[in-house]
Image (cartoon, rainbow, N blue to C red):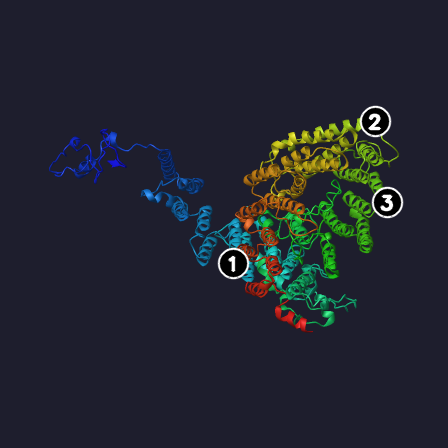
Amino acid sequence: MNMDGVAVGSKNEPPSSEPISFIPVKGLDEVVPPVTTWLNPLGIYDQSTTQWLQGQGPSEPESKQPDSQTDRESALLKAKVEEFNRRVRENPRDIQLWMAFVAFQDEVMKSPGLYAIEEGEQEKRKRSLKLVLEKKLAILERAIESNQSSVELKLAKLKLCTEFWEPSTLVKEWQKLIFLHPNDTALWQKYLLFCQSQFSTFTVSKIHSLYGKCLSTLSAVKDGSILSHPALPGTEEAMFALFLQHCHFLRQAGHSEKAVSLFQAMVDFTFFKPDSVKDLPTKGQVDFFEPFWDSGEPRAGEKSARGWRAWMHQQERGGWVVIGADDEDDEPEDEDQEIRDKSLPKWQIWLAAERSRDQRHWRPWRPDKSKKQTEEDCEDPERQVLFDDISPSLIQLSSPDLRFQLVAAFLQFLGVPSDLSPPASCLYLAMDENSIFDNGFYDEKPLTSLNLSFSGISCVGRSDPLGCRRWTRGHNREGEEFIRNIFHLVMPLFSGQERSQLCFSWLRYEMAKVIWCLHTKNKKRLKSQGKNCKKLAKNLLKEPENRNNLCLWKQYAHLEWLLGNTEEARKVFDSALSAAGSRELRDWEVCELSLLYAELEVELLPDPRGASAARAVHVLTRLTESGPYGPYSGPVLAVHILKARKAYEHALQDCLGESWVCSPAPTAPAAPCHRLVSLVKCFMLFQYLTVGIDAAVRVCEQVYAKLKGSTSSGGSSPEDAGSAQSPSSVLEAVMLMHTSLLRFHMKVSVYPLAPLRQALSEALQLYPGNQVLWRSYVQIQSKSPTASKTRRFFDAITRSTKPLEPWLFAIEAEKMRKTLVESVQRVDGRDVHTTIPETGLTHRIKALFENALRSDSGSQCPLLWRMYLNFLVSSGNRERSKGVFYKALQSCPWAKVLYLDAVQHFPEEMQEILDLMTEKELRVRLPMEELELLLED
């Protein structure tokens, strides 16, 4: 060839000086003439084509060799596929093997073109999600053929088929599965969540009746009425969890009256059942319960409630003697004050009035016979609850523990603080407000702040906007009377520790309102509330069962201290400790009483060498002595301190040497657990006051080394939260004390942040669902100049654990950092300066939200969706916010607060949102037509 006058060929010749008009072809004389045969007459076929025409393959050396990494990986994966196929053929009954084979398909499809037919198809098939799903579905169908009774495989198939099938088809398949396994409580739980989260087919009445069908079916299974399916272990506990889930569903959908009626009916059905019907199956008992419910007799929480048993006995004797009702000056409901300012935009008026009615009308409406009312006098028929609305959901509870949990759950539902955590199955479903981020007084008083355990769950009647601080403000007068009536009705039903817990909850509820008054600095309200709270405490302590109840004496003394009556509180503490006698370190209640006394003294004047510290040392020293307790008279002698330290050390060694400490069992005797927790706390505070913070930390490390082996890396389950009934829970309480003591020490003296950060990190790796620990961690990390360590820690926790709290607090930490950055960029509250570039925090927070919502617990958590919507609106991204709102409805169509938030964020869409609420049968207490009439008046 010749290009630009330069010859390119097999022979090197000098370029010709004469121009040429064609490209010469060199080396023609070297071309070998073609070999012609009868199969290749023109001699134009190469060797491989000739062999193909002869029906022969290439020789072995000429075969293509696997020369690339891709080929080797494909060969390895093919071998694994063959191995899986061989193993499932040999062990077709191995469910976990089939599930592993299904999960393996994701790895297979990451391989380029393992199943590709053509060369250009590799990338296409690599990215084809549909192919992955089809492969998984084929494997699951093979597995189900060999395991017809496996619920796990059928559930996996249904979850997979959500990508293929229409919702109506899916519902039918779910119904078939439930029909085949009516005694499987876990299956019912998943079925209810599936139906509850299907926006296209969702209505409140449909899901409400589905819960009733579920509970009535399980009751029949438990009674033995369904002979083909026996009750499985744990059925009663699972039924109780489903009942609570049902009540929270009704509360979140706005139908508070139905939820409260369910609890009222269950109290009568459980505790006041006539002896004559106890042997009947659940359905027969419900039939006998109907006449009582429809009789107009006062129910639980209402004045003069006597219960089902007393009513039936009286009916057998001829009925009640009707006594004229007392003419009480009932506080009229201030209906006219619903609209205070008609000049406001219509959407603001509607939101305020709707929330006001939610707060005032959560109790079921019943005709007042003293006022000659009838059912026709009710202005809103939805406020009346019929027996058919509640009868399918009534269940029998035979376990004493579950009976007490029913009462505790009812009180918690009404807003009374409780140590009871909702069942893990419905915890995140019920979370709908952001009180989990509220520290309360923990920053000011890390040792003695009252942990009110809100858990992010609203109480009945509250539908506040996101960001409104959750404190126990109490209900209106009728609501408070309702709660008092509940306490008066149920307290005689219990004795011992359970009765003590109810008294403790009641007093703490009233104290929480005192704390609210202290927070708002409302002196007039504080005076009256403090007076009421002291009156309640004294009345409870006057009861014969409570005169020696140290928990109540402790709360009463704490109340006096909160109200500023320090000397009076000291007298109460001293009297209680003197009455307790010389129990030394054996009684955990005495330890807890002394601990609170010492902590309050330490926080009064935070000086480790001051008089308050000397008083605290006196209390903790006298705790170890065998003689009678005496009030503080001066600094403790050094020899007494040494003796006390030896006593603490010996007592701690004795407790750690007990058999239950080393036992791997999930539960342990209650008293030894409580004793160990109280002892360790007292010893840590004693060491802190007499030696220093390092000595206190060493006590914690000693306990940690002993108990660490009994805890699981996944942390304690939500059911165990707040209950010191296992070595794991003991360690959790000790770690909380450790972090609180470090925070207090940092508050009163100069101390590095690293030990506290390390302690919180270790604790959160063991207990990723502990909200108190997360609040402390986020707060201290917000002061750090760099976020990289925090982000790595959150990333590690979210990858390794299932709880939703790490995601929620990771988002909160990034939002706090974003607020901090913007506060630096703003001047006098004006717009953000554009001279400092965006740091990417907005995109990071969005990514955290999206990742958190991928899990089932995250996608069905109303709080997470509310936070996401609120964040996008605050960022100014209105169009994307609307998309997120409608996406939230696809997962949580029952959450009324989501619709209220949307009205607040998108006022122009108000009518469309209200129409949607009406279509889905969510409770709208103030229809738009009524609002128009109220505005015209």
Front in this rendered view, residue 33 or 552: 33
Give whichever of discs 3 and 2 has the lower sequence position. 3
Per the image, the residue denoted by label 3 is: 568
Mark 1–mark 3 contact, CB under 8 Å? no
Query: Can you identify the residue that label 2 sits on?
Result: 638
Dot 1 amino acid type: Phe
Label 3: which secondary element: helix
Q: Position of residue 771 (x, y in %)?
A: 65, 44
- Please tell me whether residue 624 is drawn above or below residue 467 in the rendered image: above
Q: Residue at x 24, y 36 (%)?
A: 2
Question: Which amino acid is tagged 3?
Answer: Glu
Q: Is residue 532 above or below residue 801?
A: below
Mark 1 or mark 3, which has the lower sequence index?
A: 1
Which percent across, then down, holds residue 805?
61, 44
Task: Identify residue for label 1.
Answer: 199
Which image quarter: residue 360? bottom right
Q: Position of residue 293 (x, y in %)?
A: 65, 63
- Using the numbered discs, state the Cα–Cα distance from disc 3 to disc 2 in whole angstroms: 29 Å
Residue at the front extreme of this rendering? 17
Q: Label 1, label 2: how many angstroms apart (C-alpha)?
A: 71 Å
